[in-house]
Image (tube, helix red, strand yellow):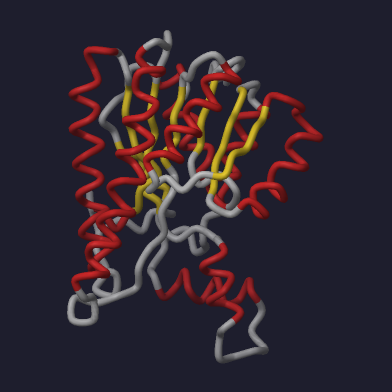
Amino acid sequence: MDLGLTGKRVAVTGGSSGIGLATVRLMLEDGARVAFCGRNPDRLKEALAPLTDAFGDAVAAHACDVLDEAQVAAFRDQVVAKFGGLDILINNAGQGRVSTFENTDDDAWREEFELKYFSVIRPTRAFLPALRDSAAPSIVVVNSLLARQPEPHMVCTASLRAGVQNLVKSLSIEFASDSVRVNSILVGLVDSGQWQRRYEAREDASQSREDWYAALAKQKNIPLGRLGVPEEAAAAVAFLASPAASYITGASLEVAGGVSRFA
C-alpha cells in the first residue's frame, strides 16, 4: 500500500532514538523528507550519520529542547528554510515518571506537567502556520496507553497523559476548519532504552533478555506475549500521518499488544 508520503515534509521531535528514530527512518524509506530534533547533540550526530549515508540531504537533525520556546522557534525556522514548508508534525518527546501519589511532590507534578503538555504545545504552536499552508497537513502525537489505563506506580504520568489525549481531541476539532488532522497513538510496552536499562539492573544475572522480556509480558498480561518494537509503533504513526488516513482525525490507535482492558 502506498501511503502517499513521497515528497512530504516531516518534522519529528524526540527523533534521535526509539520510536522517534524508527519513525524518521520509515518515513525516509517511504520517500518523505524528514527533519528531527533531540536535546543531546552527540546522540543526534550518531543517529544522523547512517541516515545521511542512506538518504542524503532528504534528512536533517537539529539540537532542540522542546520545552524551550526559542529553541523550538529556531528548529521551525531551520525546517521551513530547508524544506520550504511542512506537511507533517510528529510530537514524540517525553518520558514516563515512576511515582505514586504519596511520593510525587509539587515540583515533580509541575515538571511532569511542563514536559507532557508543552512538548506538544510548543512544537504545534510553532509549526501550525506552516501546516496551514500545506495541501495535506497532519499532526500525530505519540502518547501512552496510560492515558486510558493508569497504573498505580505511574500516577503522575498517567493523569497527564490523559490530559494530553483530551488536548489531541480538542485540537482535532479546532484545526479541522484548516484541514489539519490531529491523531495519536497510545503505546503500551515497547522495547526501549528504559526497558533495556531495567533489564541490565535485574537481580537474576543469568536470565537472558528474551526470557526477561517474555516474563515481563506475562506479568503485564499482554495477549501477544511480548513487548513491541519501535518499528511497530512507527508504522502506526506513519499511517495516521499520511494521506492514506485522510478521513481520520481525533482518533487514537492503540499499539499495545492487546493489553487494553477496554472493549
How many numbered badges does the structure rendering display? 0
Position in image of residue 251 (x %, y %): 28, 33
**Residue under the image location 59 percent in, 39 percent down:** 62
Image quadrant assignment for residue 9: top right
Q: Is residue 251 left or right of residue 84?
A: left
Q: Is residue 57 left or right of residue 258?
A: right
Q: Is residue 257 above or below residue 232?
A: below
Does residue 163 sit above or below 241 in this rendering? below
Instruction: Return the x and y of residue 168 as percentages of the image width and height.
Output: 25, 36
Position above or below: 114 against 196: above
Left or right: 3 with respect to 92?
Answer: right
Nearest to the observer: residue 104 or residue 234: 104
User: Is 47 or 149 nearer to us in this picture?
Assistant: 47
Percent across and percent down for residue 215 are 51, 76
Q: Nearer the viewer, residue 69 or 195?
A: 69
Quadrant of the rendering where the N terminus is positioned: top right
In the displayed structure, 174 sits above or below 65; it is above
Q: Position of residue 114 (x, y in %)?
A: 28, 54
Q: Which residue is found at the position 52% from the left and 20% from the top?
A: 80
Farthest residue to the front: give it: 70
Q: Nearer the viewer, residue 143 or 85?
A: 85
Q: Give the residue at x 59% y 45%.
A: 21
Residue at (54%, 26%) from the top-left corner?
A: 79
